[in-house]
Image: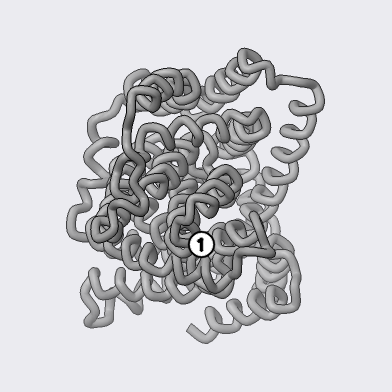
Amino acid sequence: MTILLLMGITIFIPLMLGVPIAVALGTGGIFWLVLLDVNTLKGAAFAVWNTASNDVLISVPLFIWMGEIIQRAGIATRFYNAVTLWVRWLPGGLLHANIAACALFSAVSGSSIATAATIAKSAIPNLLRLKYDKRQVFGSLAAGGTLGILIPPSIPLIIYAALVEASLGRLFLAAIVPGVMMVLIFHTYILLTTLRTPHRHCHRADDEAGQSRLRSLAEIFPLVTIIVCILGGIYYVGASTNEVAGVGVLASLLVAAVRRCLSPSMLWESLLSTARVTSLLIFVVIGAQIFSFAVFSWGVNWEVTNWIEQSSLDRVSVLLAIIAMYFVLGMFIDAISMMVLTLSIVYPIIMALNYDPVWFGIVLVLILEIGLITPPVGMNLFTIQAVDPVNITFLEVARGALPYVVLLLLGIGFLIAFPDLALWLPSRARMS
C-alpha cells in the first residue's frame, strides 16, 4: 500500500503544477518502471501498441466527427426549437425541453460538454426572457448535459471498453435503459417541483401550436433517424460500433447536405475540432496504459485485491467505498482523467468481487456524471456559465444543479439494487 501511495504522489503533484494528465501519467509510469527494472519498458511498449491499435478506439473520432457535423450545421438548434413545441404544455414547460433535447442530442454527441453547451446556447436566452427561475434553468441544462456521457455513443464508455477490454456494443446497449431511467427521473423531479405553480411554466396548447408541432417533425426526424441507425444497427443487425459510427457520420453528412448546411469550411472546421479532441483523448489513454502497466509490474493491483479479499468488508460495502472515493475525486478531477487514473486499481477489485464489468461500466459513468455538476471543478457548471458570463454566476448554476446530484445518486442506487436495468438488454441482443 506504501507503493500505491507513492505512485499516487508522483501523479498528483505534477497535476497540481499544471502538467497535462497524459504527460503526468506517462512519465510517472516510466519512472516507476525504470526504478523496478529498465527491461520492463519493453512490456510497456507492447501495452501501448495494443491499446493504440485497439479497434474500439477507431470509433472515437467517427462519433466525435458526427457530433461536430450536427452541431456546426445548426441541426441541434432546430431540433431544440422543435422539441419545445411538444413539451411546453407540461407543468414545468420548457424545462422539460432542456432534458428531452439534451437526452436526444446526447445520442449523437457522446460528449457532456458539447451537449450542455449546444442546448444551453439555444435555451437560456429564451427561458430567461420568459421569466423562468434561473436556478431551475441552469440546473436542468447542467444535469441534462451529463446524459452526454451515458446515452450511447458515449466517449467515456469507449475509453472504458478499450482500457478493460470489455464489449463496447454491450456497454452501449447496457446504457440505454439506465439512460432512459435518468431522463424519466429528471422529468419527474421537474414535474413535481413545478406542480405548485403550474401557471408560471406552462404554455396553453392551441390550434396554431398543434400545426406548428406537426411541421416541427421535419426538424426532429433527422436526429431520431441517426439514433435509430446507431442503436438499431447494434441491437438488431449485430453490427460493430465502428460500422455504426461510419453510418452515423454518413447520415449526418446527408442531413447537413439536405439542409444546405454542408460547406468546405464547415467540413474543415469539424475535422480540425475532431482531430484536436481525439488526439487529447488518445494521448491520455496511452499515458494511462503506461501507468497501469507500472502498477501491474509492481504488483500493486494484486496487493490491493488480496487486502480486500482478506478484509471483513462485504462486496456492497467495498462498492460503496469506491463510489464515495469517486464522488470526492469528481469534485477536483474531470471525468476522463478520473477514470483513467483509477481503473488500474479499481477494476481488479471489482472483478475480485464478481461484479459484471459491463454493469460496473454503467455505474462508473453515472458516478462520473456527478463529478460534472459538483464544484469546484464541475465542467458542466462552467460550460453553462460560459454561455452568458455577465448574467450567469457560477454559484447560481451550482445551486441549480445540486438536486440533480441527489437524483444521480438515486439512479446509482437503483442500479445496485436492480442490476438487470443495465444487463437485460445486452443479454437479448445479437452481437457480432
Residue under pointer 1: 372
The percent coordinates of residue 24 (x first, y second) are 70, 68
Is any atom of residue 248 visible in this view? yes
| Image quarter in which the C terminus is found | top left
Above or below, 359 relative to 153: below
Residue at 48% x, 56% y is 131
Residue at 54% x, 27% y is 245
The percent coordinates of residue 117 (x first, y second) are 59, 49
Q: Quadrant of residue 65?
A: top right
Q: Quadrant of residue 295?
A: bottom right
Q: Residues within 10 Å of mark 1 (few under 14, many from 20)?
A: many
Image position of 429 (left or right of 271): left
The percent coordinates of residue 278 (x first, y second) are 68, 43
Q: Secondary structure at mark 1?
A: helix
Three-letter amino acid code at the position of disc 1: Leu
Above or below, 1 relative to 209: below
Above or below, 314 relative to 121: below
